[in-house]
């Protein structure tokens, strides 16, 4: 059994940092272990122009703890009014690294998302031409479609048609939760990758609903049945470069989670690396952890991997982490993997 593992510093290819007091509270949790992160633009109001992305990036930089080495990689929120020229210019000058597609109504703060996919066609074409990646929240919002089927239906109804109509568009299917998504990404020729979250490698839908409703396990896409969790674990630990870490760490104040209509999101920034080391070890794939957390995503985004390294050490006694962190926006509960964690990032 390995006792220690040194890997290149990880990146998080899908992260929610929010703004204001919440940003200040959660940013140190990501900056401690991660070198870079793709920052989701679903603020209220959303980040829709290059100028807004620059202003948000400035607020993130200002909230960083002294001496932190963390680079926010900004994204724009795609709307039917997005100006293709602004997207291309913001990518060219280094402001943004991707554009995020939320189907309207699919998840938290997605009301300004896309209803009519034909109306974003000019932007998608300009992105394909300029090499701007599209990050996709892959769920249909049709109320007729069962929530557990929304990802699989999205592939057939929306994602595959978009990819066929826009050859050359580079797409990241975010936070995949199903074997259908894993298969779709695996069989695609090129220009398609997927992020996988920490929590979807750990929980299935029973964790949310059996023996009492557990709001801190509720996220979107919602966790599916066990066979899908197994497929995600196989993909993440396979060494296939099309799968990489995007935690989707999505903080909400506890009061908004523990509510009659609770918000979707698991907060995993603090303990992600300890959990992932546990999962990869359990799958006999500890030697492939670095590829998943620190190499594949950078390669997809055409960036060099981080030069700095971190070391994970196995403790003899389980790690004791607080159940929640305090933020100026209220307490935020950490994702509880339901098993003791022995791997710790050496500080
Ligand atoms: O669980 C989620 N939380 N899924 C999303 O797609 C959005 C996120 C959030 O912003 O809270
Ligand atoms: Zn997200």
Image (tube, helix red, strand yellow):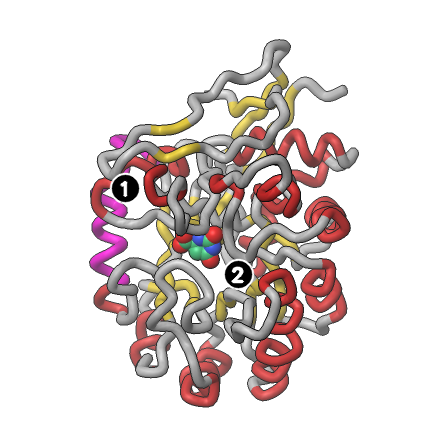
Q: Main secondary structure of the magenta part?
A: helix
Question: Which percent across, then down, holds residue 169?
Answer: 55, 77
| Element assignment for label 2 | loop
The quarter in which the N terminus is drawn is top right
Q: CA distance from mark 2 to mark 1?
A: 31 Å
Label 1 Cα crowd, 10 Å radius (few <14 / some 14-19 / many 20+): many
* Residue positioned 27% across, 42% down in the render: 22
Question: Which percent across, then down, holds residue 323?
Answer: 44, 25
Q: Is residue 122 magenta?
A: no
Residue 302, numbered circle: 2
Q: Nearer the viewer, mark 2 or mark 1?
A: 1
* Residue positioned 38% across, 66% down in the render: 110
Q: Is mark 2 within 8 Å of ligand 2?
A: no
Q: Which residue is mark 1?
A: 22
Placement of 5 over or under 176, stated as above or below: above
Near-viewer residue (293 or 180): 180
Q: Which residues are magenta?
A: 53-68
Please count the marks in the image.
Answer: 2
């Amino acid at each position: 059994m390995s006792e220690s593992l040194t890997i290149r510093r990880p990146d998080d290819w899908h992260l929610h940092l929010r703004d204001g007091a919440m940003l200040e509270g959660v940013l140190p949790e990501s900056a401690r272990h991660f070198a870079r992160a793709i920052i989701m633009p679903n603020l209220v109001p959303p980040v829709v122009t290059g100028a807004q992305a620059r202003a948000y990036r400035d607020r993130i930089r200002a909230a960083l703890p002294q001496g932190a080495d963390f680079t926010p990689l900004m994204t724009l929120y795609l709307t039917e009014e997005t100006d293709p020229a602004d997207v291309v210019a913001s990518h060219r000058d280094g402001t943004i690294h991707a554009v995020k597609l939320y189907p309207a109504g699919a998840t938290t703060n997605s009301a300004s998302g896309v209803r009519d996919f034909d109306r974003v066609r000019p932007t998608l074409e300009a992105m394909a031409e300029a090499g701007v990646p599209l990050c996709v929240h892959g769920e249909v919002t049709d109320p007729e479609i069962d929530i557990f089927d929304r990802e699989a239906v999205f592939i057939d109804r929306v994602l595959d048609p978009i990819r066929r109509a826009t050859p050359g568009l580079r797409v990241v299917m975010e936070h995949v939760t199903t074997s259908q998504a894993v298969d779709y990404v695996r069989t695609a020729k090129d220009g398609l990758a997927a992020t996988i979250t920490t929590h979807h490698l750990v929980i299935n839908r029973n964790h949310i609903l059996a023996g009492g409703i557990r709001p801190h396990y509720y996220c979107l896409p919602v966790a599916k049945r066990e066979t899908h969790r197994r497929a995600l674990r196989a993909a993440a630990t396979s060494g296939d470069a099309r799968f990489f870490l995007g935690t989707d760490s999505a903080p909400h104040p506890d009061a908004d989670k523990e509510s009659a209509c609770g918000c979707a999101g698991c907060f995993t920034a603090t303990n992600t690396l300890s959990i992932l080391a546990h999962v990869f070890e359990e799958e006999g794939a500890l030697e492939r952890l670095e590829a998943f957390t620190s190499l594949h995503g950078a390669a997809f985004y055409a960036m060099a991997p981080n030069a700095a390294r971190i070391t994970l050490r196995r403790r003899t006694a389980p790690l004791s982490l607080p159940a929640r962190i305090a933020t100026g926006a209220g307490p935020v509960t950490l994702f509880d993997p339901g098993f003791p964690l022995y791997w710790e990032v050496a500080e």
